[in-house]
Each structure stands twice: as C-alpha cells, then as structure tokens.
Image (cartoon, helix red, strand yellow):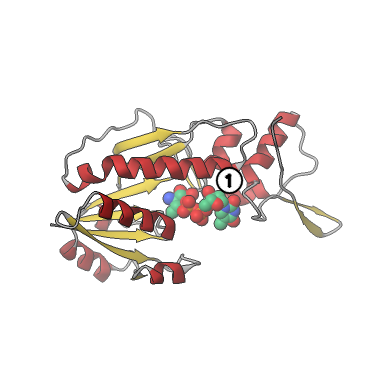
Amino acid sequence: MKKILVVSENVGLCSFLREIWNSFDLSSKCSFDFRYTSYNENSQSMINIGASEINVKDDQVVEWIVHNYDIVFSLHCKQIFPASLVSRVACFNFHPGFNPHNRGWYPQAFSLINGLPIGATIHRMDEQIDHGGILGQKEVTVSPKDTSLEIYNKVIEAEKELIKEHLISIIDEDYTLHFPSEEGNYNGIKDYERLCQLDLGSVGTLENHIDLLRALTHGDLKNAFFVKNGKKYFIKIAISDS
Ligand code: 0FX
C-alpha cells in the first residue's frame, strides 16, 4: 500500500484524482493525503476536501514527508520543492505546460507569443523548476480564436488524460523517463507582469499585437493594461469565427 502526499492549490484536479482513485478501485493499492500551501488564495475549497496547510520548505516537514510517504505529487503546487525533498522521495510534478518549452508560469500565455508547443506534462522532479525526466506529455492544438483561457482549458483536459493514463504506472513504479534533448526556456511571474503593462508606442505587426492580447486574455481576469493620463485601463480581446 503506497502512501501518496498530494500538495496542490487546485481543488478541481484534487477532486479529479479522487474520482480516478475511486473508479480504478485503488483503495488497496494507495492512499492520498491532500495538502495546500500558503500561496493558496482559495484554501477553504481545499479544506472542504479534507486538506490542511503544509510548508514544504520547512526542514522538519521535509523529514516528516520523507519518513511518512512513498510518493509526493505537486498538483499545481505553487511552493517550490527543495532539493532535500526531491532527492529523497519520488516527487512528480503535474505541469500545465509542454516541457521543456516555456517552463514556469502560465505556459500557454508565453506560447501564444513565441509559438512554442503547449500542452501538459508529468515529470519526475529535480531541484530545477518544471525540470526532470518526463513520464508522459500531451500537446494541445491552438485555434486562431483561442485566448489564454481556451488554451488553458484544453491543457487541463490533457492533464486529466495524462493522470488517467499514468497514475497506475507511477504507483507501481513501472515507468520510463524521457529526457528532452534541450533545456528549453523558463518564464517567471515577473516576465508575465512585464507583458501585462502594454506599451502604447510599441511598433510591430497587427498579428503580433493581437497575439499579445490573446496571451493576456483569460476570462474576466484583469491582466493587460495601459496607462493614459495617469489612469490605468484594462483591456482584453474577444475573437469569434463565422
Ligand atoms: O496552477 P496554475 O494552473 O499554474 C501555475 C503555473 O503556470 C505553473 O507553471 C505552476 N506549475 C503552477 C503551480 O502554477 O495557475 P493558476 O491557477 O494560478 O492560474 C491559471 C491560469 O489563469 C493561468 O495559466 C493564467 C490565468 N491567470 C491567473 C492569474 C492568477 C491570469 O491570466 N491572470 C492571473 O492573474
């Protein structure tokens, strides 16, 4: 019986993992404990599924994890796992990006700008962010009318398919890791924040400017903005087909 610690800020994916556990009848094979970190802005929904807070950067917590769990999942956990954890217990990251391209924050937004592949990846974690041997990944296709939100939704569906396909092999430790031939690229939250502040004097093709607005349009979230006469104005794009 494997004990799996799931550290996550995403209640939807945690619930999905539980559904899979039920439908695959895994109760004799493994158990899940769900935890969230201080980055979680909606901790009540995690508390509602029985989760409590954890700080994976605390040395004593790391010792406790190493002694009590066989496997750790980072299921959209915003705290970076320390080397002392990833080197001592099998840690897997479920990442909404197509490694090694646009590792880091909001991969679909950067993919809309630099054209690199986008999808979901499950990988063994090492001490670098969104880095380590890949168990499985799925690319998604992008339509000219997609904004960040539509692509993100496709990525989450791809991630769920990957969870279904690979969960048992992770529990059984029956998988092969594939190491990308290149390091790829990484974007941090500061890179994203820089994109959000639009430069009204920017010169480029209309296509590039539309793509920038697609990258920064995510439902009603206030991302892209410009400043005029000292006032901030938010902007998003709506694209439809015939
Ligand atoms: O959890 P997550 O889907 O993913 C992020 C990182 O992109 C990922 O690399 C990391 N492994 C994970 C732990 O954290 O992000 P989220 O749930 O905060 O946001 C989901 C999407 O919402 C994001 O891809 C873009 C969009 N978004 C989010 C915020 C907070 C915006 O467009 N603007 C925002 O201010």
Residue nearest the observer in this picture, 204 or 1: 1
Residue at the image position 73 percent from the left and 46 percent from the top: 198
Q: Amino acid at mark 1?
A: Leu
Residue 214 found in image quarter: top right
**Residue behind mark 1:** 149
Residue 158 found in image quarter: top left
Residue nearest the observer in this picture, 1 or 71: 1
Q: Is mark 1 within 8 Å of ligand 1?
A: yes
Residue at the image position 52 percent from the left and 46 percent from the top: 106
View extreme (right): residue: 229
Residue 146 visible? The answer is yes
Q: Is residue 128 left or right of residue 117?
A: left
Give the position of the N terminus as an image quadrant. Answer: bottom left
Residue at the image position 40 percent from the left and 60 percent from the top: 79
Indicate the position of residue 188 as horizontal and vertical percent values: 51, 49
Q: In the rendered view, tell whether residue 80 sits above or below residue 157.
A: below
Indicate the position of residue 195 as horizontal and vertical percent values: 64, 46
